[in-house]
Image (cartoon, rainbow, N blue to C red):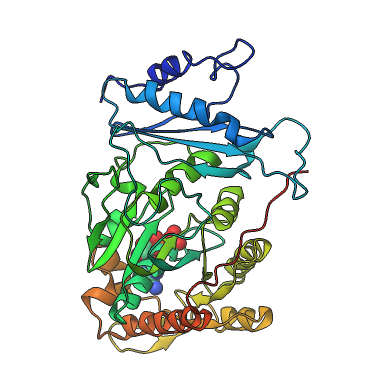
Amino acid sequence: MAGLTKEKILDALKTIEFEGGDNIVDRGLVSEVVIANGKVYFALDAGNEDPQKLEPYCRKAEDVVGALEDVSSVGVTITAERQKSNGSQANGQGNGHANGQADNQTNGKSNNPAGGQPQGGGAEAAAGQAIPGVRHVIAVASGKGGVGKSTTSVNLAMGLKALGLKVGILDADVYGPSMPRLLGLNEEPQTGPNNEILALEAYGVKVMSMGFMVAEGTPVVWRGPMVMSALGQMINKVTWAPLDVLVIDMPPGTGDVQLTIAQQTPLSGAVIVSTPQDLALIDARKGINMFAQVNIPILGLVENMSYFLCPSCGERSDIFGHGGAKEEALKIGADFLGQIPLHMDIRETSDAGRPIVASNPESAEAQAYMDIAKKVWNGLDAQGEDTRVAAPNIVIE
Ligand code: ADP
């Protein structure tokens, strides 16, 4: 793929004329272009205009880029600022690229002339719509990085699997994907006959991560629309169905990208991971507020690295103080899902690609994750089949 460059892609896109004499690149409609192993992703930004207007350009863009040498597939997303609820257009020129508060319409089309509907989700489905065959989608989030969000996501997924559920895990942390390491997976996903992306599997759980498509250490600059484009495809083009729960490991933090994901993904609820330190709890509060802004229920708080279990004597030490997350949960009326000890086995099994719930289910640490999985499932089960909250419009004034 050495011959494929962003410049070549932009040159090809410059052949597409836009009304008024410009081409779509010079008109500023094309976002950052991401190339990953011959797969090309970019977005066309409609700003405040009707996104439908860009549909024909989207198809042309797929065709010209798909015809380039070394391109195996093309993912084009149309982004636009949301329109005001009374149907009138927002004033001013759109800025969906920079702020990520964009309404993304993921086309998930490819240059495969066979086209067709992938299993597990219509290619035309917008990211906020339900994923056919997936009962619940939950987000695992944290106010900042390094608190054990990914470790919790993967062990929660394994715990749900151990309850007899069909489970998938989507690594939405495009900036620092962890699932390849946490699950010891290094394969590039294959595409099926209808150009659907075949989910990988580890310990009986379906998995998809940008980390399977972009070589480790490859610097990729992700802007809001790019994240949504990649994520939209990971949601709608991957063979998830049938699933009881799809666990989404969110990118750490509470910026616009995270807010957009929270808003655009068909979430049943969110799990917030925090460490006991006050500082982390302030961050956790930001995470809670972010989901509150878009009306996603908080399924509960997990306190990670909560206490230290001495590997030699088994004695418990509350090295960071005790009970902060529980109090916080009580204050905001969310469930407290449980505490996970700081334990060497958790780190070692994670680094070795063998999550502790799958590799040592009898251990006290695995049991702590299992208890959390049961509470999460009870919370979801109580919601019934489809209680997804309709995402409200974010209007940029
Ligand atoms: P995040 O996703 O929040 O950035 P990770 O899940 O990648 O955090 O965890 C960060 C590091 O902490 C990893 O090395 C992981 O193995 C370790 N870790 C996470 N939770 C625990 C725990 N309860 N005990 C010991 N190590 C942990």
Identify the residue shown where x is 51% and y is 49%: 126
Above or below 182: residue 155 = below
Front position in the image: 21 or 251: 21
For the N terminus, which image quadrant?
top left
Query: Which quadrant of the render holds ligand 1?
Result: bottom left
Above or below 221: residue 326 = below
Q: How many marks?
A: 0
Expressed as whole percent of the image width and height from the top left, the position of residue 208 reads: 32, 54
Identify the residue shown where x is 28% and y is 69%: 355
Front position in the image: 351 or 285: 285
Q: Is residue 145 visible?
A: yes
Above or below 171: residue 389 = below
Expressed as whole percent of the image width and height from the top left, the position of residue 178 reads: 35, 55
Expressed as whole percent of the image width and height from the top left, the position of residue 31 reads: 53, 30
* Residue 168 position by quadrant: bottom left
Above or below 73: residue 104 = below
Left or right of 297 in this view: 8: left
* Residue 158 position by quadrant: bottom left
Identify the residue shown where x is 28% and y is 62%: 206
Identify the residue shown where x is 28% and y is 42%: 195
For the C terminus, which image quadrant?
top right
